[in-house]
Image (cartoon, coloured by chain):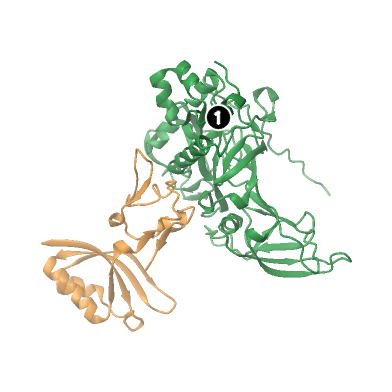
Amino acid sequence: MAKTIAEINEKIKQGKAVVVTAEEIIGIAKEKGIKKAAQEVDVVTTGTFGPMCSSGAYLNIGHSKPRIKLGGGRAYLNDVPAYTGLAAADIFIGSNALPDDDPRNKIHPGEFNYGGGHVIEELVAGKDIRLVATAYGTDCYPRKRLETWINIKDLNEVVLFNIRNAYQNYNVAANTSDRTIYTYMGVLRADLGNINFCSAGQLSPLLNDPYYKTIGIGTKIFLGGGIGFVAWHGTQHNPNVPRTENGVPTRGAGALCVIGDLKQMSPKWLVGTSMLGYGCTITVGIGVPIPILSEEILRYTTVTDAEIFSAIVDYSDAYPNLKPDILGEVSYAQLKSGKVTLQGREVPTASLSSYPRAVEIANTLKEWILSGKLLLTEPVAPLPGVESGITFKPLNERPIEE
Amino acid sequence: MAVSKRIVLHFPKRMVDRPIVCRLVKDYDLEFNILKASITPEKEGLMILELSGEQGEYDKGIRYLTKSGVEIQSLSQDVLRNEERCTHCGACITICPTGAFELDPITRWVNFHDEKCLACGLCIKACPPRAMEVHF
């Protein structure tokens, strides 16, 4: 029954493609069986909408008259520092960047109300952004100071470039200490007061293609409300983790590096986010279409929350101290039930990733494909798989002795 | 008939040092539970009370407060959800001590039941997209 991406694209163009979401395929496969479902369904769409810290955007602001060389100088967007280690008119704003005068955690927990993620949200919303820059001045770039409003519509390139997004599974966070802790996994109350998780589970892109058989470099995706691409594997991409029988990783595993033109994205899907006591980040919407090229690929997309497990990690000790210990394993079905039994106690659970918005992404992607707005792409190279031997290394610290 | 309501009291500067709430107990036989109390740098006082007692006495107590110059607001409108910013992630659910946030098990939308809200403010800063707003 093997299909090719070219054949599926032909069906999309003729308006004959069958496209369903990774949630819908579960019931379809149950009703019709894997074989029939794989024959009938051409594409399964996925989605995820959660805080993704390794996100940012680069901007080419155009040259001022007289010229200024931002490279090697300093630049701020709404008081948030942008990276200037590039050429004269290119800057990069990272989602975790904070204004120099933000008090951070001086009074713990810090609020982190505005940072790089919020700048990106305002930029994509079409709001004017205040750019203040200083430079050292050269013969060819004499200007030393620039203060101006900028707007996304007037800039040259404005590109979202996220070096690690859409994690394939993720730690589940708990706190066994006797005080509330404030983490990137949210507020964790003392003595196992709550458990937080952050994955779309059965709708999450890489959990539906656990061995990266279809998602690769060049795959065209839903990114931030517009169209983007998989540019590379994400940093910390780690295919060699424990997996269940059906191939699904039971720990954080693969990740995607994604890129796309910010000018066609939307603030609905790029939301500046504040983690109390931790910092600023951005909540990113990503959806990946999975072409059903074989029964095997279809079978992967039928994975349910009950079949996806992750490790509960103690963020008061094991996580900060890089210890491998876990408190237990739990399925997303259990996590989504609202409570988990851990160490003989019922602990309430909460999510940091929005499932209803992940469903909306998968449905949007489905509409885009059905209407022919988005055709599938053949990856130009695969993501590193289990056979790559890649592992996630800790830092090998070598003290510097003067 | 017994009533129990949650109210927000605003004390003007001149009244901050006067014993007001104890009169509710002595004169009107009302029970109170202080949920939150603060005095701003401009010396205005703010207190959130759960007030209970007989309906008739309750009404008299409220009249007494109003006549004394205390401005009264009912509580339920004071914590609002900015529907445009809320992403329905659910981070608020385990933060709220009164269970005012509830997850719809089918759609997984997060419902906010403001009648259960005590305006403690814990959700305000714990909300990642900062969708919860407090208005006094």
Residue A342 visible in this rendered orientation of the protein = no
Q: From the viewer's side, name the closer residue of A356 and B50.
A: A356
Provide the secondary structure element on which disc 1 rests. Answer: strand
Residue B65 at what x, y percent from top left? 23, 76
Task: Give the amino acid type for the residue marked by disc 1 in the picture.
Answer: Ile
| Chain with colour green in the figure | A
- The quarter of the picture where residue A169 lies is top right
- With B31 as the anchor, is B90 left or right in this view? right
Badge 1 is on which residue?
A290
Q: From the viewer's side, name the closer residue of A333 and A13.
A: A13
Residue under the image location 58 percent in, 29 percent down = A9
Query: Eyeballing the image, is A145 above or below A312?
Result: below
Residue under the image location 56 percent in, 47 percent down = A224
Residue under the image location 87 percent in, 64 percent down = A140
- With A23 as the anchor, is B57 left or right in this view? left
Q: From the viewer's side, name the closer residue of A375 and A253.
A: A375
- Disc 1 crowd, CA 10 A, few/some/many (<14, 14-19, 20+): many
Query: Eyeballing the image, is A385 above or below A198?
Result: above
Quadrant assignment for the N terminus of chain A: top right
Query: Eyeballing the image, is A312 above or below A59?
Result: above
* Subunit bearing disc 1: A
Residue A174 at what x, y percent from top left? 47, 41
Q: From the viewer's side, name the closer residue of A352 and A155.
A: A155
Residue B43 at what x, y percent from top left? 40, 79
| Chain with colour orange in the figure | B
